[in-house]
Image: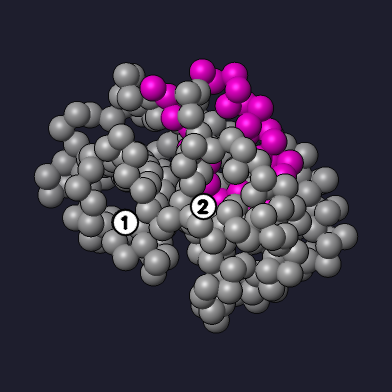
Amino acid sequence: MRTAFISDIHANLEAIEIVLADIAGQDIDRIVCLGDIVGYGPDPNPCVARVRERCEITVVGNHDYAALGRMDTLGFNEYARAAASWTAQALDRPSVAFLEALPLEVVLDGLHLVHASPLEPDRWTYILSYQEAKRQFVAFPEKICFIGHSHLPIVVEQLGEEIRAISFTPDVPVRLHKDRRYLVNVGSVGQPRDRDPRTAYAWYDDEMGAVLLRRLEYPVAEVQRKIIAAGLPPFLAQRLVDGV
Ligand code: ZN
């Protein structure tokens, strides 16, 4: 069984279309979405529709929560806050109904799926240090947890007390050992932040026992044009070419 994981689409329709087209050629059996379908980008409703049509399982992200008015956006920077209120008024009824029904976390065939962190998933913790990773590994019993949220693709491996980060190089399979545990960040479809502006997603093949990261060019200029036309902050257009 080969499962594709898409995350942090952020209403970037051009990016999700490229990813879904690529998935069609990767021998994928099913697609999981790890949340943040909306927020920042200009196409929230078409992106929700794509996820609803194509993903077998979807968990909710903090920007989905913000657009639904389920959390206050005081912790957001000014751009995220402006985008959240723009998105809240742009969402149509079917999109709202879909987002409102999404769970915070799911266990699927022994895989833990959550947007930000398995420990207190509605606190939206970023896992950016060994210390934080250590806290998170005790919060799920499964062998592998798939996450998004930081927009930084990485594989974190735990063996006993030891935790190490394995760089997630595109198209190089990372083998997952049977006696170790993993946190796998699949990167961001719609707003990469690792200074590589290409869209990102990952797949996991349980027979191969490996994960693989894909990075693909998509029409960034078209998305930038739509962001400006929508009246969203111009910084949100600029960051897409910088990959930050
Ligand atoms: Zn996000």
Question: Is residue 216 shown in magenta?
Answer: no
Magenta extent: 1-27
* Disc 1 crowd, CA 10 A, few/some/many (<14, 14-19, 20+): many
- Estimate the x, y position of residue 107 in percent, counting from the top left: 32, 44
67 left or right of 41?
A: left
Classify residue 205 by image quadrant: top left
Q: Residue under circle 2?
A: 35
What amino acid does circle 1 point to? Pro
What amino acid does circle 2 point to? Gly
Q: Distance between the residues labelled 2 and 1?
A: 14 Å
* Disc 2 crowd, CA 10 A, few/some/many (<14, 14-19, 20+): many
Secondary structure at badge 2 equals loop
**Does any atom of ligand 1 lie closer than 8 Å to the CB of label 2?**
yes
95 left or right of 121?
A: right
Q: Which one is in front, 24 or 231?
A: 24
Vertical comparison of 32 with 73: above or below = above
Q: Which one is in front, 23 or 218?
A: 23
For the N terminus, the image quarter is top left
Secondary structure at badge 1 equals loop
Q: Which one is in front, 90 or 20?
A: 90
Residue at (32, 65) in percent of width and height: 120
Q: Which numbered disc covers residue 118?
A: 1
Residue at (69, 60) in percent of width and height: 93
242 left or right of 152?
A: right
Residue at (56, 51) in percent of width and height: 8
- Estimate the x, y position of residue 224 in percent, counting from the top left: 80, 53
- Estimate the x, y position of residue 115 in percent, counting from the top left: 44, 54
By what rule are the colours in the image chosen?
Answer: one colour
Residue at (54, 79) in percent of width and height: 72
